[in-house]
Image (cartoon, rainbow, N blue to C red):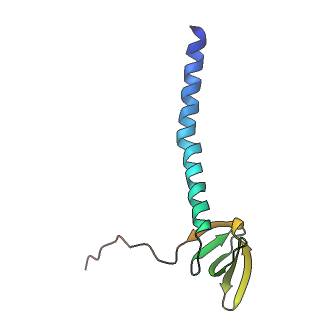
Amino acid sequence: MDTYSIFIPMVAIMAIFYFFTIRPQQQRAKELRQAIENVRRGDTVVTAGGIIGKVSRVKDDGEIVVEIADDVQVRVMKSTLTEVRSRTPANDSKTDKS
């Protein structure tokens, strides 16, 4: 009887830890992988080095060409992307009050 009184709270703590930290992190990682796979010309991307640029060309070998300034393009591996921002801006939910 004494063993169960120690075991049950440990299982509960592990379950809470899983649902509040591990699972959301896995979902964010999955969304990032999908965004990287679907990156296309015109999207704005952020690399692991913090470089922000616009995708000029997507190659088949896991590489993209990113324009980081006017007439300055760099080749970047897709695996180094940390964020993909779609070229179509999100709808603004603010309403005009004038």
Query: In the rendered view of the protein, which quadrant contains the C terminus?
Result: bottom left
54 or 37, nearer to the observer: 37
How many marks on residues? Answer: 0
The residue located at (57%, 38%) in the rendering is: 18
The residue located at (56%, 45%) in the rendering is: 23
Furthest residue in direction front, as rendered: 60
- Reply above or below: 20 against 36: above
User: Along the horizontal axis of the image, is 48 left or right of 35?
Assistant: right
- Return the x and y of residue 46 as percentages of the image width and height: 64, 71
Furthest residue in direction left, as rendered: 98
Query: In the rendered view of the protein, which quadrant contains the N terminus?
Result: top right
74 or 16, nearer to the observer: 74
- The part of the image, by quadrant, that contains residue 10 is top right
- Return the x and y of residue 56 as percentages of the image width and height: 64, 83
- Reply above or below: 73 against 84: below
Furthest residue in direction top, as rendered: 1
The residue located at (73%, 72%) in the rendering is: 61
- Return the x and y of residue 74 as percentages of the image width and height: 73, 81
User: Along the horizontal axis of the image, is 9 left or right of 52?
Assistant: left
15 or 50, nearer to the observer: 15
- Reply above or below: 48 against 76: above
The residue located at (26%, 76%) in the rendering is: 97
